[in-house]
Structures are given as C-alpha cells and as structure tokens.
Amino acid sequence: MKQKQPLSLDGVHHTVPIPPGASFFRKFLAFSGPGALVAVGYMDPGNWITSIQGGALYGYLLLSVILLSSLIAMLLQAMCSKLGIVTGLDLAQATRKLAGRRWSFVLWIVAELAIMATDVAEVIGTAIALNLLFGIPLMMGVIITLLDVFLLLLFLSLGIRKIEAFVFTLILTVFLIFAYEVMLASPQMSDILQGFIPQKEIFTATLTGQDSALLIALGIVGATVMPHNLYLHSSLVQSRQYRRDPEGMKEAIRFSILDSNVQLSFSFVINCLLLILGAALFFGHDPEQLGRFSQLYAALENPNIVGHIASATLATLFAVALLASGQNSTITGTLTGQIVMEGFIELKLPPWLRRFITRALATLPILVAIYVWGEREDVIEGLLIYSQVFLSIALPVSMIPLVWITSRKKWMGEFANSKWLITLACLSTTALVILNIQLIIEVAHKIFA
C-alpha cells in the first residue's frame, strides 16, 4: 500500500476557517496572513544594506531593479499559491517527487544554505541594532540572537493567526519609521519617478561589472526575491480551510494571490523607501563613509551630512526599525527550515531544535570573522552583502522546479500556467542565471587576478 504524503506544516495545516457565504472583504481577511509572513523576507536587514548602498552609490537608478525584482517576486509567489492549493504539496515535497531521493538531498543542501544565508543577515542586523541601541558588543549581540529559540516557542504556541498579526504589526512599524524619515529627507519626486525607468547607465555598468554595480544589483535581487519564501508560501496557503474542489480551489487561489500581491506591494514600498533614503541623504558623499549601519546611524545625527533634520531621535528610530526587521524574520526562517527538511529528506525535528541548529550554524561564520578580524563592521557587513548575493545564485534552484511543475497539466490540471506566464517565468529565470554567471566570472577574476 502506498504511503500517504505527510501534510506540510501539519501543526497549522487546514486550521484557519473560511466563513461560508461571507462578503468579499471578510473572505479576503480570512485568507490574508500568509502574504505577510512571506513579505517579511523581502524587507530583512539584507535588503537594508543593499538598497541603502544602492541609493548612496547610484542615486535613484536602482529603483528600476527593485521594481523588476518585486514584479518577479509577485509572479513566483502566485505560482507558489497555485502549487500548494492545487496539489496539496509544498514546493519541497513537489520537487522531491519530481527529482527523486538522490537529487532531493542535493537540493535540500542548497535550500539549507539559502536559509543560513538569510539567517546571517538577521543575526548581523540584530547584533548591530543591539550595539547601536544599548552598546552591546557585536560578539555578545551575535550570541544573544541564539536565545530567540525561546521567543520562537512562545510564538508557535500562539497559533498561526496571532503570528500573522504580530508580523504585520512589525512590518507596519518599519514602514512608518522609514516613511517618516524619507518625508524629512524631502527627496525630489521627479528624480524618484525617473528612477523607475530602466536607464542605460546602470545596465552598462552591470553588464561590464563596473563599480560593483552587478554585485549591488544582484544583492538587491537576492534580497528581494528570496528562495526560502517560495517553499514557505506554498505551504502556508494550505493552512486555510478552503474547499478541495475546482471552485473552492479557484476561489482560494484568487484570494491567496490578492493577499500576496497586497503584502508584496507593501514590501516593495519599504524597499523603495530604503533606497530613496540612501539616495536623498547620502548620494554624492564618500560611499566608504556611509556603507555600514553604524555609519548610517551616525550620519542621521550629523547635520553636516543630512542637514537640519539630523537628530538622535531619527538615528534611534533607524536602529529600532533594524531590530524589528531582524526579529521579524525569525519565525519565517524557522517555518521554512521545517518545510524543506521534511519535504526534501522527510526528516522531522522539534521546531526549537531545528531552529537552534540553523541559527548556530549561521552564527558560526560571523563569530569566526569577529574572532579573526575583531569587531570590524566592514568585514561583518561584507558577509551580509555576500549572503544576499548567494541567495540570488541559489534562487534558480527553486525557481526552475516551481516553473516546471506549475506549467504541467499532469500536476496542475486546468490550473497549469498559461503560455504568457510560462514565457515571463522562463525569461526571468534565464536572465537571472546569465547575471549569476557574470557575477561568478567577475568574483573569480578579482580573486585570481
């Protein structure tokens, strides 16, 4: 007898009721939530450093990269919603069925490394925020982040709806802080709008590897389109009690995609605010003096750099938002780790143990870097940027199976991707693979030159 496929995130699977005969708005609220947990990954500390540095180095030019990345993210997350709702599998489970046991182990390793890369950004962001707010040394701040395992246990006991509400509150906090700071910075609206139009200069610089434009651009893509979010979203959409018939699935797909697009639009605005802040306050200044969190924190207090808006309150709000951003991703990282481990290699661990192992492995390279080079923020934040670039390199490993599976009627039936969706997804994947190859060549040239 064939063994039944285990449920994805069985603790929350099919636990959120959908009120029958409810209005459009009430149904939307019932389906809303997974999009917020996914959107968290699009505004973690990795986004901060790449977006702010992109603004400081290139002004508003890279707004077009954020826009393109966000549109690709919306496309991919919509496919994840369809995959989870129609097949009853998350992306890790579906990929295992497609690739077989041996290749699934390799893909699991890549997925775990991507989760660790995300964790590196969270650990660094949290440790630096603790240092800025309370003067805690970076080494101690990194160790403190190991204690979030206990915070996680509290969150998981509250239930998925309360977790979603808490996460959305933190997202709103980050948004309000940066909207306020950008408003004080008074950027030129005409320059911002022009930044959303792809400019020849940035593409020339990117394709030639000039001035590290490719590194920053791919860092933005990696920080915006997060591989682990594809696994997470395909599982979380199954937490709703939608009807498992064609009409019920059609309705669930419609509301899940709407939820995802609304929340990702929110994260798109926040990422734009980050880049606009970097451009409005720091473009034209020496990037070596403004490329790190502590320098940005100090600059917000310095009237010689940001003018009359400089204040300790502004700098403190920046650090508070950084702390909120780092903590916000803790829950989603844990859930994703559980999904990929159970989906790819069918190994189940208690969430606290799973989280502790992942966080301990993520902190190891940071602790080694601090031990070897001391508490040098240029080294620590260099790890953060390269972690985002690794995410961009790892992205096709999850994109390709997602596009392939959701485009096959054998898997999806009437819900298979249309031809124009397949075309867009293939173009996005191909472009990213080409840019990744260019990045590998550039980095190899710098190492061996």
Image (cartoon, helix red, strand yellow):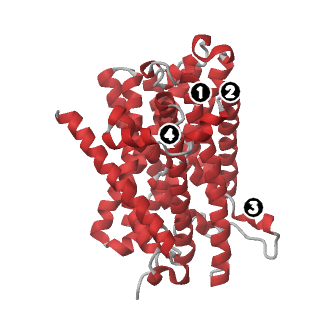
Q: Residue furthest top?
A: 304
Q: Using the image, determine if residue 423 lies above or below residue 140.
A: below
The residue carrying mark 4 is: 62
Point 62% across, 49% down: residue: 155
Contact? badges 2 and 3 (CB < 8 Å): no
The answer to the question of whether label 1 and label 2 lie on touching residues, with beta carbons closer than 8 A, is yes
Q: Residues within 10 Å of mark 3 (few under 14, many from 20)?
A: few
Residue 324 seen: no
| Sequence-first disc among 1 and 2 | 2
Percent across and percent down for residue 30 are: 73, 64
Question: Which amino acid, by three-letter code, is at mark 2?
Answer: Ser
- Please, what secondary structure does the residue beneath circle 3 have? helix
Circle number at residue 204: none
Give me the C-alpha separation between circle 3 and circle 4.
Answer: 34 Å
Q: CA distance from mark 4 to mark 1?
A: 13 Å
Residue displayed at 48% across by 51% down: 225
- Tell me, yes or no, whether the two marked residues, 3 and 1, touch with CB atoms within 8 Å: no
**Of the image marks 3 and 4, the number of the one nearer the N terminus:** 3
Q: Secondary structure at mark 4?
A: loop
The image quadrant where one finds the C terminus is top left
Q: Which residue is mark 2?
A: 186
Q: Residue at x 43, y 39 (%)?
A: 202
**What residue did someone put label 1 on?**
280
Q: Which amino acid is tagged 4?
A: Leu
User: Badge 4: few (under 14), some or many (20 or more) residues near its Cα, within 10 Å?
Assistant: many
In percent of width and height, residue 134 lies at 58, 20
Foreground mark, 2 or 3?
2
Does residue 411 appear to the left or right of 18 in the view shown? left
